[in-house]
Amino acid sequence: MHHSSNTIIKTSFFTLAAYCILTCFILLLGAFYIQPNSEEISLCQQNKDIGYYEGVIHMLLHTDGRYFTNILHAFNPVTFGYIHGYKLMPVCGIVVFGLTLFLLLLRFVTFETQSHLLLIIAVFIALFFTLSLNVITQFYQMAATFVYLWTWSFVFLWLACYTAMWQTERATIRLALFFATLICLFAALGNSEMFLILNTFLLLVISLFSIFRKRTVLQTLFISLFGLGCILFSVTAPGIAMRASRFKVEGVPLLNIHPFYNALADNYRVVSDLFFHPFTIAASIALYPTVSRLSFRVELPKKILNNWLLVITALILLAIAYAMTLAYYIPTQNNSGLPVRIFASTQPLIQSAAVLLYTFLIQHLLVCAPHFIGRNLSLVSAVAATMLLLGSVTYTPMNNLTHILSDYRSGKLQRFNDAFEKRYALLRKAAANNACYKKAVIPIVTEYPGSIHTGASADILPNRTYGFGNDAWESYFKVDEILLKGDTVCKFTILPNP
Amino acid sequence: MKRAFIIQLLYTAGFSLLLMLLFTAYQIIHQRSEYLISLRNYFKELETHNETKDSSCFTANIFSNIERDFEYNPELQMRLNDFKKDALHYPANVFLYINKHFRQRVARSFVIPKMEEKYLCVTLFHQPSNHFEIQLYFRTENNQMKLDSVSNLYKYFSYLDCLEQKLQKENNKVIAAH
């Protein structure tokens, strides 16, 4: 009996690993066909034209207070002229995200259970991208991932450095980790206004914890003060006022009850969708044997796993997720549909809350009916893992993987990629021309695959309609004028867009 | 004891240094923001001085400031005169473009503004295929901003020549097709 139970657990383990590998494969298949949009080209080109330093300052003056995102715009393969390097960015994003989360959680679990931790993180990430409300901004669109995905990595990293600093007894290592924490905190606070709320909460928690435990008080004080400085730097940047003024709705007072209510309603919708999604339930059940095998090297998580603190932690995570979305709802006074990209940012918190609550539920079921459930738990877990694996490529509603596969099977991804490769060839040819005024006529891209691209509005529009479109691509490829086939308006019939 | 003191000192020094860097960055950005506001006001004033708010007034004001730069160069003076004649629209009049950007959202091809000696310098990066920069130098006189000089305007003239050639070529094509 014991032998067969072990075999089932192993099967479950390998089925979950297969699910993660399959998810990764499908996501990377999509990444192979992605292409930059006009805004991204414009953001990267700016740094090539006016210099990295001036580029970052320009953005802080006119666009936003996201100083570290602007630094990332200046240092990526596209800025360095390697446009195909754009396809590598999702790979970097997922690796860094997984690695930093692993580094953080590694501070809490013992060495013996590291392989279990690795599986939990892999399933968590696979589930995250399978159910992501906006996988394009979360994974494929480089400039957006700097805001919505990479910020998480910096948050994990500064917390990992801080925890390591707390745990070490060696003074010089503690000093080095102190500076590493400051640098990572600087990065985490300069990416998105939404994360200012999360980081403020975390800084408050570490400050209270440090004072309460009387450990690393000076370092924590410095870290919190520096964090406060970064927050002030970000929110007082002139660009943030410009951004807010673009969103501002005339005649509506800033402190209005509606954004709070709208945010609550949308949060409720997203949380219930994610909580009751079959994949979340299946993953939580499938992971339970692995989660229960984790052994911790700190005392607090042990207590958390064994009582109602688990539920309280989950509720705190949901409350933070709600507070984070307010950073969007209050300035925009949003009441027009669900802003999915905002919720893609809070999804790790919602997902963590779901896993904690399901773990708590399973534990209580085990207490209520220990014999029946306990005997069959490994079998249930293996079935859940198999459902997850099979469902990832077959279950359609709210599943990014099936969307990518469908676009691939219909040839949309390939045609989209080919259209862009053709565009590059034409633009390079025009740039190599000896004429003093270089002009290129390029075909219109007819199909934009919804699984990896936001669509035609993010590309060059006919007749230089709006936006970064033509100007950005012209600057990047050193061509004076780009016309789409059929354009009747040329560059100097209208004044360029600001 | 001594080692512990040195480490404490390093904590304090490192933290202070980082905080100072942050504050310096803050100062630089806010200083630039102030320059930008005064430039905006200047461009606004140029337009409102004219009752009809015609763009030619705006250009006339600009040219009165930069004419002396070309005083000793007859060829450039001639070009400037030509430039003034049909300078009611962009691209013939680059200043309209600059004005639009200062009044609205600033394009990503601008570096604005920084102090060079006593002048406020605005740089515009132009023509993608043959990159060149136009620099506008402003100075403050009696609390009022004035455009002092423009560098590389002659490069802009050759850019216009090139545009003219291109338009001519396209016109010829249309004539030939008919």
Image (tube, coloured by chain):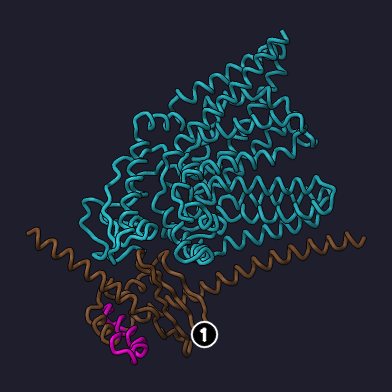
Chain colours: A cyan, B brown
Residue visible at 76% across and 46% down?
Answer: A164
| Residue A248 visible somewhere in the drawing | no
Q: Residues within 10 Å of mark 1 (few under 14, many from 20)?
A: few
Query: What's the magenta bit mostly, secondary-structure-wise?
Result: helix
Is residue B65 on the magenta stretch? yes
Note whether A307 is above or below A237 in the view shown.
above
Q: Residue furthest top?
A: A1
Note whether A209 is above or below A31 in the view shown.
below
Q: Residue furthest left?
A: B178
Q: Which chain letter goes with mark 1?
A: B
Quarter of the figure with the C terminus of chain B: bottom left
Q: Residue furthest bottom?
A: B72
Say which residue label 1 marks.
B118
Q: Is residue B62 left or right of residue A258?
A: left
Q: Is residue A207 left or right of residue B141?
A: right
Note whether A189 is above or below A357 in the view shown.
below
Residue visible at 49% across and 76% down?
Answer: B35
Helix, strand or loop for disc 1: loop
Q: Which residues are magenta?
A: B50-76
Q: Residue furthest right?
A: B1
> Residue B34 appears at what percent x and percent y?
51, 75
Q: Is residue A374 left or right of residue A264?
A: right
Residue visible at 60% across and 33% down?
Answer: A124
> For this rendering, which residue is in front, A291 or B165?
B165
Is residue A62 on the magenta stretch? no
Amino acid type of disc 1?
Answer: Lys
